[in-house]
Image: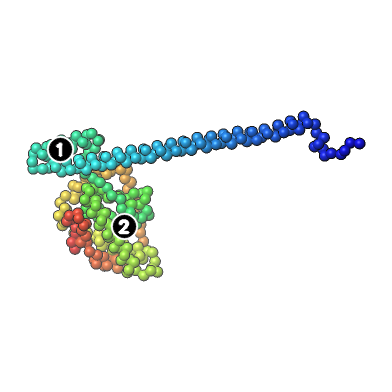
Amino acid sequence: MSENKPPCMLIPKSITAYNRDYTIIPVIVFLNQLLSILELSFFLYFINMSLAVGLVAANFIYNSKTMDIESKKQKIKKLLALSKSPNENEAFSALEKAKQLMEEYGLNEQSCIYTSQKIKSTKTYNPWRTIIAHIIAWLYNCYKYQDKNDGTFVFNGEEFDVFMAGEMYTYLVKTIERMAKQNIRKNAKHNFRKSYKYGIASRLYDRIETLGKSCSWAPQRESKIKAITEFVQSQENIVSSKTVKTKINNLALGRGYRDADSISLNRQATGHGGRYLTV
């Protein structure tokens, strides 16, 4: 009588061998798929690395060219200043050299003379900051616009004028913020605090306009502002801002207007000559 064995033991050898071979197939398929995935991953990694290296190289080249052009602008600017020399030969030589460089680099006189500076502000419309920026741009013969992407004010003009505009604007904004913090109680409503700042800015506008009309560079203002305005508008797509109505608290407005008289406008940039206002 034959001994009872589990069913698997009764399967012919040929069949069990077939099954062993059959179970290897999924493993081979899996290994092939894994190899394909690894090859694809390596390929993508290689592509990403190539793109990264390319971007770094392109950025380096761009920055190098930008720096080179800026250095040429400075050189042309000095040559143009030298072209006004009382020595006719020196003036003629400087002007010819400036023209040669401008033609070589595709520049014009305006692009070499003018510069711009971005000053941090708020992205949302802020009336009192806009008032300050506007009157400061006028004071220092600049053209001002606000970048819609980040809210920064951009002052455009001759290098020294732009520098002074940025200095004065920053000084006045910080002063107004400090006075509002000191003179307005912490639990005051937002509109009250905003109206107080608006009052200060309004009074400063009047004071700066009065003083600006009598400063030494006033006679050149109209022509300079016209020239820089035409240049910037030809280079940039400037969109006019819509007028936004602002609710004003008259009590806070009056307080700010009176307090603004305590702000000194005797602001001079250290090491940059004597262009400043006196009270």
- Other residues around mark 1 within 10 Å, as few (<14) / some (14–19) / many (≥20): some
Determine which quarter of the picture holds residue 233. Answer: top left
The residue lying furthest to the right in this view is 1
Q: Determine the secondary structure under disc 2.
A: helix
In the figure, is residue 47 to the left or right of 152? right
Q: Which residue: 14% across, 55% down?
A: 216
- Other residues around mark 2 within 10 Å, as few (<14) / some (14–19) / many (≥20): some
Front residue of 216 and 47: 47
Where does the image place residue 107, in percent across and percent down from the top left? 24, 37
- Residue type, mark 2 in image: Arg
- Distance Cα–Cα, label 1 vs label 2: 41 Å
Where does the image place residue 207, in percent across and percent down from the top left? 22, 61
The residue lying furthest to the left in this view is 87
Front residue of 11 and 224: 11
In the figure, is residue 195 to the left or right of 161? right
In the figure, is residue 56 to the left or right of 226? right
Of tags 1 and 2, the one toward the viewer is 1
In which quadrant is the C terminus drawn? Answer: bottom left
Asked if 118 appears above or below 104 in the picture, the reply is below
Q: Which mark is residue 95?
A: 1
- Residue type, mark 1 in image: Leu
First in sequence: mark 1 vs mark 2: 1
Q: Is residue 8 visible?
A: yes
Q: Which mark is residue 129?
A: 2
